[in-house]
Amino acid sequence: MSTRTTQPPAPGSKTGGNKFDLRSGTLPRRFPAALLAGCAVVVAGVLTLFSSFGLILWALMTAVAYAAIIVATSVRVEGGRKAKDRLVTALVYGCFLVAMTPLVSLLYTVVVHGMDRFSPYFLTVSMNGVLPSMDAGGVYHAIVGTLAITGMATLLAVPIGVLTAVYLVEYAQGRIKKVITFFVDVMTGIPSIVAGLFVVALWIILFGPGHTNGAAGALSLTVLMIPVVVRSSEEMLRLVPRDLREASYALGVPKWRTITKVVLPTSAAGLTTGIMLAIARVIGETAPLVLTAGSSAVSINWNLFDGQMMNLPVFIYSQFRMGGAVNYERAWAAALTLVLIVMLLFILARLVGRFFSPKTR
Amino acid sequence: MTTTDAPKAAPPPTGKRRIGDVVFAGLARGSGLLILVILAGVAAFLVIQAWPSLLANTSNFLTDQSWEANTRENPSFGVAALAFGTVLAASIALLLATPIAIGIALFIVYYAPRRLAATLGYLVDLLAAIPSVVYGLWGMMVLAPQLVPVYEGMTRYLGWIPLFAGPSSTSGRTLLTAGIVLAVMILPIITAMSRDVFHQVPQGHREAALAMGATRWEMIRLAVLPFGKSGIVGGAMLGLGRALGETMAVAMILSPSLAISFNLLQSGNQTIAAHIALQYPEATGYGVSALIAAGLVLFTITLAVNMGARYVVARGNKESA
Amino acid sequence: MAKRIDVSGLHVYYGDFLAVEDVTMTIEPRSVTAFIGSSGCGKSTFLRTLNRMHEVTPGARAEGKVLLDDLDIYGPDVDPVLVRSEIGMVFQKANPFPTMSIYDNVIAGARLNNKRMSKSEADDLVEESLRGANLWKEVKDRLDKPGAGLSGGQQQRLCIARATAVKPSVLLMDEPCSALDPISTLAIEDLIHNLKEDYTIVIVTHNMQQAARVSDRTAFFNLSAPGKPGRLIEMGETNQIFTRPEQKDTENYITGRFG
């Protein structure tokens, strides 16, 4: 009963007696959109007047003008708190636009410059016998190399990565689990060039200095790919409900068959998505391949163990380094090829994840 | 009596070990251990191959700024300038990317129309899918020329700040340009981590803020940002780790020089990773070994940063749990 | 000042789904009104429309009139932010801001409206609000400690102090005791008794004894059929609802025959 003796605070003091109002000055609902359109038109007009119209400059100046005007009007009509809210809203939208600017500009330039030389011819011939003065040659040998090197890296990294994930989720416990998890994290952070140097060092010890071949490149990509596969697979395996495993054990199915027949098939779509994203991630790696697979091969080479092997990223880089007009065209066209492959993988991965995952509800 | 019954009454809890179980468990365990072996191999081979040049080095490896390693005798090289350039470029990237990434994450989680949010998130993820060599190509051919007039303006009006002293580069191939491209590359990493923590902010905390009359921004300031702090810091550090190790974009954009310079608008400076990629094809004598030593330094720096990131995130998770 | 709420013809939708149908009621100032009914009958949903908190849920919208002393909170130009500072809310699960101290938790909402509050004003407001929430004696020596370190019941009273520090005229409580032990529940019920001298209080509860103990008036909500929208079945003096309900449904629920 002692609790009853204290008085609760008297409410209503802030509005001063009976006078209270829930309305505040509010900008009309359509005002922001109208203002934005207005700013866009005016800025476009001004820029055209000074004949310095550029898409990015226009977007940037429109955004700044809009933010300034909306905050100024909001301070007057709606008060400081609302104005701050409007400012942050404008900033947050601005951040997204700022991030999209390089994406749009990059994809636009890659397509526009890449189309100059992108053709069935470009995709189906190599650089064998192409002299620096010639306006000829293509990326067939680099596509072959990319497929072979990435393929071998995938064959090595996927079993190791998925099995490690199975071990971490289904078997490991206590200290060893912590240790492996920790070192997978460490491996995630290895810079790609260091993975290349590792294989260089290993190859010097095994074969002596100066040996470059596709297998070396594949091994360096494997090092980069394993932690990505482990991480994504682990996440997918953890999504498989406990009950499913228990239902299987209850039928007397041994653990390894439960994993191979129940757990892995259930998470197959997720595992595939993760693996495809991992491939998309390493297929564009350049630095380790410059060191390990060589950067001067010009002819078609399907043999991972015999000599230098060209691939798309290194092709872009080496053409870029040569620096002639034709070289730049080849670099852009190869960049378009590579970006198309990566996007395709990226989109396929999402589609697999969306359409083939078992429905939980 | 009791002694003879005991073994039957208490069979080994796992029953007899099936051959399939043994093999499968062995394979899984083997893969886990193989990862440890590979990592030990990475460290060991790098040290073994770096050692000869470090022994023969006539300068102090950590403080010298020059790189005269391509000889068979008395090489003289150090990573001071390279390490400085690496940290400077990555810091620029981090300073530019972190605020924008937080903004994007807030946009996707709290501002964007709900139906579009997932798609807009994919668009940001696409930034991570673009190969670094393509970023290099774009940065050098498209971005750098665009920035030349901007840099001229900066030297004119901000030239009194030593970082922006003129005359600015006429090609735009400066450390700042490289830093901007690195920032774009690490945006999706920081954004993804920030988005994850923003999604985890308990609804109760957000509603508590709104229910006492907070605007959307005040709700974010009261409930979202304090909760997400550790995730943002962790994401930023992971991005920093990525920026430190990024090779191609810097190698293709920067017009390098091996000296420590604080000037961001003139060509100069160089990063460890880009130096390795550019020097390796021409390396002779102690050259390769010296580059591997530089790689070891890079490995150590990124390792420290990444472990710091994991530590921050793990501590944050423990606090909020 | 405690204010009165008049609801007329209110419908609540989630997207196309009608969740609550046609509610008309009056909530008297300086009294406690309890909403009872089986789970999923829309009473919490309806509660949230009284300070426009339902707008936080994507797709949720309300149609109809809610007058707060003759001012329609859904009227044109009405700012939901101001509505919520006038009509506070306490949630089922105590939700003090985990990164803030007890002191900062109490003052958080008040600071939004009054940035330039002096140190002594702030101190006074914190003490006043914590006293009002019957929490001052327990926490006055550790105001700088995190609010998450308190017990569940103390956390809930901290949340009430935080809500009253904004000086609203109405307090909405969404099952404030459902996660608490009986002793903490009693402390909150005591507190509700004190608060009604100055506030209009609406409490959603699953616990019929609680409704009978704390409320002056009771509203019973129910689904007309499974999958159909929830509706207000009956509202009246608590005493009357629990002893002489007019509707058969209400009687069945009160006597525990279903729900």
Image (cartoon, coloured by chain):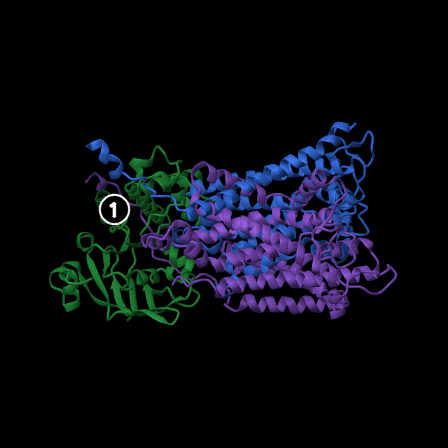
Describe residue A5's horizontal placement relative to residue C244 as left or right: right
For the image, the number of numbered tags is 1
Q: Would residue B141 be visible to someone looking at this image?
A: yes
Residue C217 in the figure: left or right of residue B191: left
Residue that appears at 62% across and 43% down: A190
Q: Could you say which is closer to the camera, residue A142 or residue A260?
A: A260
| Disc 1: which residue | C188
Viewport quadrant of the C terminus of chain C? bottom left
Residue B272: in sight, yes or no? no
Q: What's the colour of chain C in the image?
A: green
> Which x, y percent locates residue B303?
60, 38
Res A32 → quadrant: bottom right
Q: Chain of mark 1?
A: C
Q: Colour of chain B?
A: blue
Residue B288 locus on image (x, y percent): 76, 38
- The vertical placement of C83 against B287, above or below, is below
Identify the colour of chain A in the image: purple
* Quarter occupied by the N terminus of chain C: bottom left
- Residue A15 vs A116, above or below: the answer is above
Are there few (<14), some (14-19), or many (20+) residues within 10 Å of tag 1? many
Q: Position of residue B202 (x, y in %)?
A: 41, 51
Q: Secondary structure at mark 1?
A: helix
Q: In the displayed structure, does residue A192 sit left or right of residue B122?
A: right
Callout 1, which amino acid?
Ile
